[in-house]
Image (tube, helix red, strand yellow):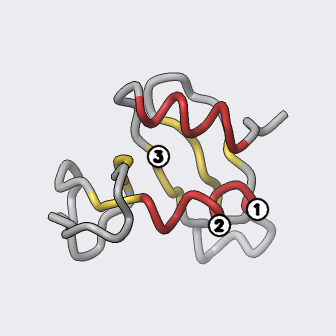
């Protein structure tokens, strides 16, 4: 069962990161998934859409911040994003 918005925010504020896993283009039945890195818990699409304004890319992957698949929590969405 995917995490609620509140539990996802708590985990992200606690230092967890959200990872987006894109489907294999050769497997049309696969979907994009959203999950927390440390806990391994799934986040549903509706919850992800509520979180997205407070997420900033983390330069810890193969593609860097411009095409990041991993995101961290930003408490002030109106503030300057790194």
Q: CA distance from mark 1 to mark 2?
A: 5 Å
Question: Which residue is label 1 attached to?
Answer: 46
Question: Which residue is label 3 attached to?
Answer: 18
The disc label shown at residue 49, or none: 2
The disc label shown at residue 20, or none: none
Q: Quadrant of the C terminus?
A: bottom left
The residue closer to the viewer here, 71 or 4, is 4
The residue closer to the viewer here, 76 or 33, is 76
Which is nearer the N-term, disc 3 or disc 1?
3
In terms of secondary structure, where does tag 1 sit?
A: helix
Residue 74 position in % (x across, y down): 34, 52
Find out whether the residues at labels 1 and 2 contact each other: C-beta distance under 8 Å. Answer: yes
**Within 10 Å of the Cα at label 3, are there few (<14), some (14-19), or many (20+) other Cα atoms?**
many
Residue 59 left/right relative to 17: left
Residue 52's place in the image compared with 35, above or below, is below
Residue 1's place in the image compared with 66, above or below, is above
The residue closer to the viewer here, 22 or 60, is 60
**Within 10 Å of the Cα at label 1, are there few (<14), some (14-19), or many (20+) other Cα atoms?**
few
* Badge nearest the viewer, 3 or 1: 1
Residue 47 position in % (x across, y down): 71, 55
Residue 38 left/right relative to 61: right
Residue at the spot 74% in from the left edge and 52% down from the top edge? 44
Residue 60's place in the image compared with 8, above or below, is below
Q: Quadrant of the N terminus?
A: top right
């Amino acid at each position: 069962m995917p995490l609620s918005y509140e539990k996802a925010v708590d985990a992200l504020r606690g230092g967890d990161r959200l990872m987006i896993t894109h489907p294999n283009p050769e497997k049309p039945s696969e979907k994009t998934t959203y999950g927390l890195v440390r806990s391994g818990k799934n986040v549903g699409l509706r919850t992800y859409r509520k979180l997205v304004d407070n997420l900033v890319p983390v330069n810890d992957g193969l593609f860097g911040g411009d095409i990041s698949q991993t995101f961290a929590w930003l408490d002030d969405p109106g503030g300057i994003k790194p």
